[in-house]
Amino acid sequence: MRVLIVSQYFWPECFRINDLTRSLAEKGHTVDVLTGKPNYPDGVIFPGYRAWGCSVEDWQGLKVHRVPILARGRQSGIRLALNYVSFVVSGVLFGPWMLRRKKYDVIFVYAPSPIFQSIPASFLGWLKGCPVALWIQDLWPESAEATGYIRRPWILKLLKRMVRFVYCHTDLLLVQSEAFRSNVAALAPGKSIVYYPNSVESEFYHPPEVLLPEIPGLAAGFSVLFAGNVGTGQAIEVIVGAAELLREYPDIHFVVLGKGSRWDWMCEQAKARGLSNLYLEGRYPLETMPGLMRQASALLVTLADQPIFAATIPSKIQAYMAVGRPILACLNGEGARIVSEANAGFTIPAENAKALASATLQLYRLSDDEREKMGQNGQRYYKEHFDHDRLVQQLIDALRDLTLSFGGKR
């Protein structure tokens, strides 16, 4: 198949679509990418790129077409909105010109926030006479409301109408969580909806031999590692609260690897409260993360206490299961259900610092063999439900069926 990937986010930004794109190409499909200029998560354009102007680059034998974009900035709702809008406008204006001599069998949209990045894809699908598949990672407008960026009812109502427009102008909707299905169906009557979960790079299941940095607090004692975005949706206040409650246990360390909009606040709180058991080490290269995760005694995932997040399966759950360490899941809904169903760790109600501290102590007091069994349970569940190679083949089958059915309608 000739596949066009449309995603506002792409390498060197760290997103699931990178590995999925590479795997499609490795299986013999011709793949191009339409994306923006990298600026996530720090909100500034990466070195070697500039915000304005179109560019084409080679990435592992693939052509990556980049359109102009306004960087998202930091902690600014207006800048974030303009970042979203700039990709949609640039994609519609410049995408057809950059891809003017290209023909595709299908367009595949990777859609974490914002969902509206599929608008250029639908326009390109109309121009080129091919179907569009949309992989929904976040529910909109619920996601925008839950993170606090948008609160005005009239704006949320307008966003819902726009989401309905987006869904109606795609040919196949894939959802990363079964709990998304009813919300999506309500705005996309008659559309085909398929459950298609996230996976992770194979390196998480088979960590490569790479030189790992020494992370304070990680390799010694009982370490609880949180890896990923440090933002509003992650409710990282619960980590600070649990660390404060467990400060009398010098052997228990909370280690945070990642950055985001709440990073500065977390650093300020750790200093103000004198939390010597909370290590805020920043971001590390993706290739080091599987090995660093395996050094931890336990892996922590948190989400805010919002209905939208209860429906979400954060992709770090798949990563945590793949590396085979016990999980502390401080969240509600689907994510908690999966960890519990796999018997891969302990689940804690979202934003409950006292319960998180208690569960951490409970895990700390288990034997090494008991904790190892939890990690093995997680790995087994990952192979059964989230294996990368199996899911890539499922996607190929779904896209091929879509192209065949679309051709039959013309």
Image (spheres, helix red, strand yellow):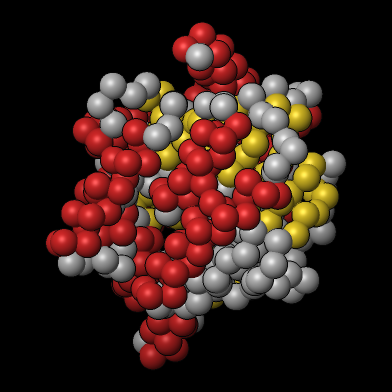
Q: Nearer the viewer, residue 121 or 295?
A: 121
- 39 lies left or right of 300: right
Q: Quadrant of residue 107?
A: top right
At a point 75% along the width and 59% down the height, the residue shown is 55
For the view shown, which residue lies furthest in the top direction? 408
Q: Quadrant of the N terminus?
A: top right
Is 351 drawn above or below residue 20 in the view shown?
below
At a point 83% along the width and 44% down the height, the residue shown is 60
- 398 lies left or right of 365: right
Residue 39 placement (x, y as % from top left): 60, 68
Q: Quadrant of residue 319?
A: top right
Q: Nearer the viewer, residue 36 or 42?
A: 36
At a point 63% along the width and 46% down the height, the residue shown is 96
Residue 87 placement (x, y as % from top left): 53, 59
Q: Nearer the viewer, residue 124 or 281?
A: 124
Is 249 drawn above or below residue 388 in the view shown?
below
Question: How many labels were placed on the picture?
Answer: 0
Residue 387 placement (x, y as % from top left): 59, 27
